[in-house]
């Protein structure tokens, strides 16, 4: 079946793209003296959120707003419940206090902003989309200006080159860095397109509704780049990028994906279950990170936390599909 082939090809491209993008992101952090956690929150997060942006924008323009909303809601739930759950089941993650108290509150703020906009008038208008994009821009400016000196321990070690100029050790040539970033982003985009196309084709064949397609099949498909990048980051011991990528991707999904989509085409809520059920799962699993990080060991996520997140995601799927 052609749809199954699309799924397999898409997964292959996503794995390759995650590897290439991670190499480019690490090299970029070395060259610019930017902490890896900031690179994870910006470059990697934006690239891995590109599939959600493309899918949501196209869905809204084609007159399927529930698919656009469900894609973002489902992707954010999958990023924390499925992707983070799988990632910390592989190895533990130490969460830095300066990172956690900046990025997690921003995630909750973006989530509550999204919830508030939908509650007021059951849509994301162009004005509200502009507010979301402006909020994201202000957050990125804050990251680059104020968080950089807060994580000095993550800055690369420098040594003199042949001309006596201090450069980061193991610095990759600029053209290779650009190639990895470009090819990685392109492979992630192409792989996600194939995966989503194949998944949606299979789902429609079995007569699944638009909301269910968006919040399960499409959202899981567009979350595969985060899963690939995070697992590769854990294997390569680049844990800062793994954490920053997931938190940053959820912030990007809410503020950039929905914000930019609403600027082009206002998103009208159609299926009320997105507001009465699904959004509470997103808020709940986002808030769940707070006790998981501090219990039982402070500022650490381990395999037990991964099990809790995976069980939570399983419960979400059971509730949604039941």
Image: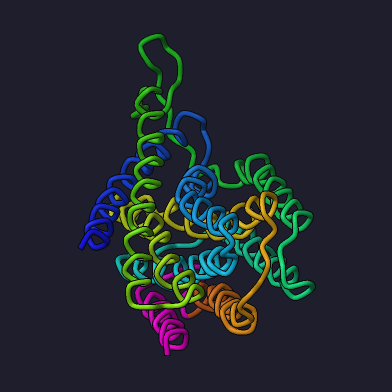
Answer whether residue 310 is magenta in the image. yes
Task: Name the residue: 49% across, 38% down.
Answer: 155
Answer whether residue 298 is magenta in the image. yes
Task: Name the residue: 36% across, 58% down.
Answer: 197
Q: Is residue 229 above or below residue 170?
A: below
Camera-nearest residue between 130 and 123 = 123
List x then y, in percent, for residue 61.
59, 54
- Quadrant (top left, top right, bottom left, bottom right) of the N terminus: bottom left
Camera-nearest residue between 205 and 182 = 205
Q: Is residue 143 above or below residue 268?
A: above
Residue bounds of the magenta highlight: 296-322
Task: Name the residue: 79% across, 73% down.
Answer: 120
List x then y, in percent, for residue 253.
56, 58
Magenta stretch: dominant secondary structure = helix
List x then y, in percent, for residue 220.
40, 66
List x then y, in percent, for residue 89.
32, 71
Task: Name the residue: 56% across, 53% down.
Answer: 57
Camera-nearest residue between 294 and 217 = 217
- Quadrant (top left, top right, bottom left, bottom right) of the C terminus: bottom left
Q: Which quadrant would residue 65 be assigned to in this image?
A: bottom right
Question: Is residue 236 at all visible to an observer of this figure?
Answer: yes
Q: Is residue 133 above or below residue 82?
A: above
For this orientation, the residue located farthest to the bottom is 322
């Amino acid at each position: 079946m052609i749809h199954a082939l699309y799924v397999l090809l898409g997964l292959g491209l996503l794995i390759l793209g995650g590897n290439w993008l991670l190499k480019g992101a690490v090299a970029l952090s070395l060259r610019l003296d930017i902490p890896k956690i900031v690179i994870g929150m910006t470059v990697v997060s934006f690239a891995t959120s590109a599939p959600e942006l493309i899918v949501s924008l196209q869905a809204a323009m084609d007159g399927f707003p529930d698919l656009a909303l469900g894609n973002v809601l489902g992707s954010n739930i999958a990023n924390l419940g499925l992707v983070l759950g799988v990632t910390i089941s592989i190895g533990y993650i130490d969460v830095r206090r300066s990172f956690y108290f900046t990025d997690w509150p921003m995630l909750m703020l973006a989530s509550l902003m999204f919830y508030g906009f939908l509650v007021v008038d059951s849509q994301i208008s162009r004005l509200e989309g502009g507010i979301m994009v402006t909020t994201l821009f202000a957050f990125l400016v804050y990251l680059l200006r104020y968080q950089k000196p807060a994580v000095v321990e993550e800055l690369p070690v420098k040594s003199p080159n042949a001309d006596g100029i201090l450069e980061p050790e193991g610095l990759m040539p600029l053209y290779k860095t650009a190639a990895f970033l470009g090819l990685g982003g392109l492979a992630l985009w192409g792989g996600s397109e194939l995966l989503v196309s194949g998944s949606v084709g299979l789902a429609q064949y079995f007569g699944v509704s638009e909301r269910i397609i968006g919040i399960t099949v499409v959202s899981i498909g567009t979350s595969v780049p985060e899963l690939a990048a995070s697992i590769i980051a854990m294997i390569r011991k680049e844990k800062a990028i793994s954490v920053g990528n997931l938190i940053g991707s959820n912030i990007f999904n809410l503020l950039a994906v929905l914000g930019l989509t609403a600027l082009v085409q206002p998103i009208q809520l159609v299926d009320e279950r997105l507001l009465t059920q699904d959004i509470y799962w997103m808020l709940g699993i986002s808030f769940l990170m707070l006790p998981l990080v501090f219990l039982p060991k402070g500022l650490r996520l381990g395999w037990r936390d991964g099990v809790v997140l995976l069980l939570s995601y399983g419960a979400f799927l059971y509730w949604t599909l039941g």
